[in-house]
Image: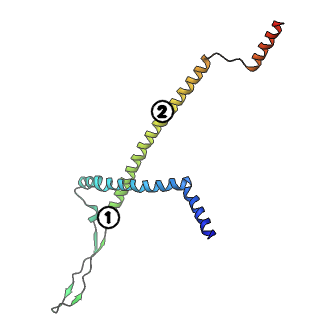
């Protein structure tokens, strides 16, 4: 029983590590973002690509290697030769997959560029604010009268004591 509770404790420690939780959140958000990008490509961009290429539906493009065979039945209703589907070389689906990949990559690239630009502007603004704060602190320090050091105060007290005698 002690080994199970020890393993459970190790598992809890493993799960509670920040990078494991961050990775899990990243995978979940990435999956949801993937669905958004896939919908964007399939539902919004591919119809336009097909339209611009002359109403082509790439997934239907194929080369027939071997034609389909119809079912042959005798007069008694017995099947002599079963039906066989055609054997197809579906190059259109491959083309569709390549186009999907390129459009998904383009969408992700655009998203990363937009987020990177927003982040760069935010970092530049924060840096400018920090520099302005440092400049204001430096100006305030230069304008304030300089406080005497401990040695200067002691020297002044000594001189006053000597003068008082």
Q: Where's residue 95, x and y in %?
A: 33, 61
Mark 2 lies on a secondary structure that is helix
The residue lying at 54 percent from left, 53 percent from top is 19
Residue most extreme to the left: 75
Q: Dot 1 surroundings within 10 Å: few (below 14), some, or many (20 or more)? A: some
Dot label at residue 125 = 2
Q: Where's residue 18, x and y in %?
A: 55, 52
Mark 1 lies on a secondary structure that is helix
Q: Quadrant of residue 15?
A: bottom right
Above or below, 8 against 19 in this view is below
Dot label at residue 131 = none
Q: Nearer the viewer, residue 25 or 60?
A: 25
Residue topped by disc 1: 93
The residue lying at 25 percent from left, 61 percent from top is 57
Does label 1 or label 2 sit earlier along the sequence? 1
Nearest to viewer (mark 1 / mark 2) = 2
Q: Dot 2 surroundings within 10 Å: few (below 14), some, or many (20 or more)? A: few
Q: Where's residue 138, x and y in %?
A: 59, 23
């Amino acid at each position: 029983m002690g080994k199970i509770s020890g393993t459970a404790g190790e598992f809890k420690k493993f799960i509670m590590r920040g990078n494991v939780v961050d990775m899990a959140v990243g995978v979940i958000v990435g999956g949801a973002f993937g669905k958004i990008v896939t919908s964007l490509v399939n539902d919004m961009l591919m119809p336009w690509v097909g339209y611009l290429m002359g109403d082509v539906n790439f997934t239907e493009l194929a080369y027939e290697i071997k034609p389909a065979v119809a079912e042959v039945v005798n007069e008694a209703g017995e099947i002599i030769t079963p039906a066989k589907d055609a054997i197809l070389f579906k190059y259109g689906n491959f083309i569709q997959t390549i186009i999907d990949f390129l459009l998904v990559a383009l969408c992700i690239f655009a998203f990363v560029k937009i987020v990177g630009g927003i982040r760069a502007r935010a970092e530049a603004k924060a840096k400018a604010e920090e520099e302005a704060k440092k400049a204001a602190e430096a100006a305030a320090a230069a304008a304030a009268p300089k406080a005497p050091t401990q040695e200067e105060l002691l020297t002044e007290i000594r001189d006053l004591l000597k003068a008082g005698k």
